[in-house]
Image: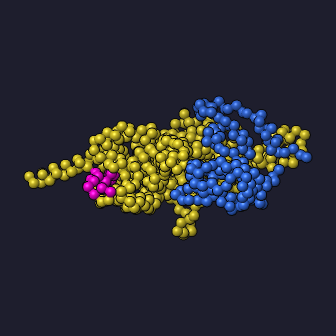
Chain colours: A blue, B yellow
Amino acid sequence: MAANILNIVKKDSAKKSNPLNKEVAKSIGEVKLDKFNTIDGVYDTIVPESYKARKLWTRPDPKMIHSFIPGTITEVCVRKGDKVNKGDKLLMFNAMKMANTYASPVTGTIRKVHVRPGYIVPNGALLLEFEEVEIEHSSFIEESFE
Amino acid sequence: MAKDKKVLDLQKRKERVYLGGGTKAIEKQKEMGKLTARERVEALLDEGTFNEYDIFVQHSATEFGMADKELAGDGVIIGTGMICGNPVAIYAQDFTVFGGSLGLSHARKITKIMDYALNMRIPLIGINDSGGARIQEGVNALAGYGEIFFRNTLASGVIPQISVILGPCAGGAVYSPALTDFVFVVDKISKMFITGPEVIRTVLGEEITMEELGGARVHCERTGNAHFFAQSEDECFIQIRKLLSMIPQNNTAPAAQEEEEEPNTKTFKISSIVPADPTQPYDVRNVIRSLTDDSDFFEVQEMFAGNIVVGFGRIGGHTVGFVANQPLVMAGVLDCDSSDKAARFIRYCDSFNIPLVTLEDLPGYLPGVHQEHAGVIRHGAKLLYAYSEATVPKITVILRKAYGGGYIAMCSRHLRADFVFAWPGAEIAVMGPEGAANIIFRKEIADAEDPVAMRQEKIAEYKEKFANPYVAASKGYVDAVIDPSETRKSILHALNVSSDKTVYRPTKKHGIPPF
């Protein structure tokens, strides 16, 4: 099996670090330069904090139920151990001046409830956990590169 | 005698209006470090040129105890004046009068001066300092905002519209600045948001201060809603005057032609700014300064999406708009924000007949899930759209790297650049030598005894054959490969020969840019 090209690139770029041209260093003044990786090489450049702080993507766990809009929980309709079908009411919440229903996106057993009526939740907050869920065909395409 | 009495009466009436919301309210305004609306107008305009209208306009609301409330000028000042000898229309909201809140009469004064500016084809300046809609006037206040937004859109691309945020600008009110061409903010004074900290706290439980939510810095660095940042109101007014000196009065007038001045080539020596190694950074603004008259460059959105630089400068006395990749920040890659920033600036220049000079040096579009999911496809497409759509003279100079999609996007011949120049060190290729070697010679590299050495060899081979300006020049995609020291001369000549540029495009109502 031939070596993975990306590993070769990684090995190669790790050791690479050209000193900054003196004249360039003078002209750009006192700035903090970082290594910035692209497919076309490693660049010495300013990498803004906002870019460094970006959240790296992880595949969502279907067992974890998160809020999709900020709001106030008004009713929790399930308890630990409950068996829930896809489409069943999990909880009710007020958001954007509307009463909303949170229907279960999966079929499974509730493992833990993280919220109570009255809780104010931001977008993306963990609301419920499932023990195990029946996963329908995933809409995510399995990545098969390399 | 009788006449004198009437003049005296006029004087008295005027003085009452000039007092705005009264001495106490003015004191409070000063405590916040702010000038009053009238002081602002006087400070911005050429001395003694301000002519005010509608000072006796009153509101006609009767509900909620409004019937017996008299509001000086209904909380806004409108008029015309001069900036550097050129006419402008201006309005300034007066926070001392009922919090500068916007009611129907207030809005009608603003729309009156907007109509005036549009008819007279002169720039419009709006100074915003208002608590928002005057709730007591109900839907009439909303109607007022809507009328303003409609006129902002109507005037867009016809006259320059400048918004100055010198206080709060909240709720619906923020959409007028958002529809205008340039937004000026001042540190610690400007605040812009749709929903304020109070609502956010009660509804969402998020604790945030006004400054953190929508202060001047936030809008200059993070959101890109503002274009110019100043430490003080006075500095802000200098910036506005500077901007107006660079741009035309309307979309049919040319920008003022100045006397040609040579750049300061001692400080900005063009041949030694750009390092030969394409992975090393430099400040592209120094390249711009090495090209412009008196090395003067007026940057727009300096603090936002620093990986692209946009702004105005003069070459041979003509105002040009510069768009330049900035290798100093994130290697100069294109991403969502930098594409947005550049596309908008290009459309501004095109609307107002300002020729575009593009300085290119970028490795391409920024990879990553973060960017893909943020919609880099549609944001990046804005740049292609704006360049392709622009009919002003378009001059592109390839300084160093021009790889892949970045090569096409940065005003290539294919998007109808009129002149494409490349420096001898330019690398114009479908992708960078490293990336290309990885793909083309994948098998050779992987099978080699020393894959790292083999890869370097193949990179060198690719560089030698393809990463130069001559392949593109042999196809006519590059018009001329030039010595860096000839750049200013080449651009100036290109500007001179294209001053009467005319192109024909299919008739349409309007295109559908990837908003």
Left or right, B104 with reference to B341: left
Q: Position of residue B345 (x, y in %)?
A: 53, 52
The image quarter in which residue B285 lies: top right
> Up-down: is B115 above or below B340?
below
Q: Position of residue B171 (x, y in %)?
A: 46, 53
Left or right, A95 with reference to B474: left
Q: Position of residue B195 (x, y in %)?
A: 49, 51
Number of numbered discs on residues: 0
Is residue B92 or residue B215 the one in the foreground?
A: B215
> Up-down: is B117 above or below B334?
below
Image point 54% across, 69% down: which residue? B508
Q: Position of residue A12 (x, y in %)?
A: 79, 38
Give the position of the C terminus of chain B as an image quadrant.
bottom right
Image point 82% across, 41% down: which residue? A8
Q: Is residue B477 magenta?
A: no
Is residue B349 or residue B339 the one in the foreground?
A: B339
Image point 33% across, 43% down: which residue? B36
Q: Is residue B72 magenta?
A: yes
Image point 59% across, 51% down: which residue? A117
In the picture as drawn, the residue positioned furthest to the left comes out as: B1
Inspect this view and state whether residue B256 appears: no
> Up-down: is A49 above or below A89?
above
Is residue B268 or residue A129 the one in the foreground?
A: A129
Inspect this view and state whether residue B306 appears: yes
Give the magenta range.
B64-79
